[in-house]
Image (cartoon, rainbow, N blue to C red):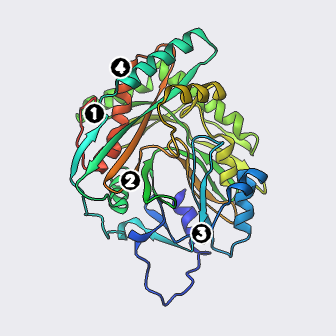
Amino acid sequence: MNAQLLENHHEETAVEDPSAPTPRTDEATFRFASYGRALIGHGIKATLDAERARRLGLGPAARQLLAEQPPGSILAGVVPFDRAADPFLFVPQQVEDLPMRGLTHGGQETSTVAEVVGEYNPQFICAAGAAIDRIKTGTLEKVVLARSLEVFADKEWNPESVWQRLYQQNPAGHSFTIGLPQEEASIVGNSPELIAGVLRGQLTSHPLAGSAPRLTDRTEDQKAAAVLAGSAKNLAEHEFVVRHISTALRSVAKDLIVPSGPDLLPTGQMWHLGTLIRASLYKGLGSLDAALAIHPTPAICGSPTAAAQALISELEPDARGFYGGLVGWMNRDGEGEWALLLRSAVLNGNRATLHAGAGIVADSDPFDEHSETAAKFRTMLCALGVDRAGSSL
């Protein structure tokens, strides 16, 4: 789907000065790649004002800002996990549509990892135990708890290099970088989960819920996939998420097509249960409106949403920021893609801060949930040059 979106967008994208040299991709403020192609944004022409977003609502404010821009413009950026926090959404000065196979600049540059902090996190295990107690004694059904990990290198991280390695690990995912304006930092990641993609009014959402680590032995890896596909716990969790998202999407779309059961989706480090939902977006709305209608999903927050968010604020030591939020882009016609901001890191100088989460339910085991977050960390750790294959962190 992304290739079609990019092909359609390429016809409208205008370079301000065709005789100017091609911008360096290592200086980009925005990168979003999937299905072999990438949108590369340079500079910031306009930023969505937080006051406008609060006054109009984020979706309408984004569409209004885009309507003020010339043809070929896109809106790009990130929306935080906490809907009450300010997003960072902007219009790049220039946008390129490029094949990923041609983006080799900086791809081989690496940093040597000097230290990894937070591999074993007893606070997370205690928090998971507390969450299980709350679920058993209250009305909360599920909460997704996250923990962090820090990786220090011998020199500054190169966001483009990490981005390219993430794409090579999982070309079917959505690889991204966002340069944050208020600090010398970048968010880099590769999300396996498309929250909302829109092309010519047709909406696609691919929620994931239920996962298992990939294994190096092929036979054992296939067995792990089969166990996941037959897991009553994971299938029930997945069905709940799909039902929740399908209900939420009816506020922005019609003619929903929801498969009766999930498929198995492999990434470089994990197996996931996924269901591809299709619908027709109501006229006048855009891909960001659709993404906001279902954000945050039970797969990254919990259920009921308000109670889960309150428990996350209580049990997680730090605010998530953009982790668990939305990352993507939208053009003036409302077409675009918004992925769940997972498998990511904030790169700031020689420091990389990673997050990973696990869904806690009544029959969860805190140590198993810690191991699940460890498996999810591996995507970013591998991209940063840390080998943790087979480790439980």
**In the structure shown, which secondary structural element does the residue marked by tag 4 occupy?**
helix
Quick check: 119 left or right of 12?
left
Question: Which residue is rendered at x = 51% and y = 61% of the image?
Answer: 181
Of the two numbered discs 2 and 3 in the rendering, the one whose residue sits closer to the viewer: 2
**154 or 378, which is in the foreground?**
154
Q: Nearer the viewer, mark 2 or mark 1?
A: 2
Disc nearest the viewer among 4 and 2: 2
Q: Are marks 2 and 1 in contact (CB under 8 Å)?
A: no
Task: Confirm whether residue 282 shows in the render.
Answer: no
Q: Quadrant of residue 299?
A: top right
The circle on residue 215 is 1
Who comes first in sequence, dot 4 or dot 2?
2
Q: Residue 221, can we see it? A: yes
Residue nearer the viewer, 232 or 22: 22
Question: Which numbered disc, 3 or 1, marks the residue that appears first in the sequence?
Answer: 3
Which residue bears the numbered disc 3? 9
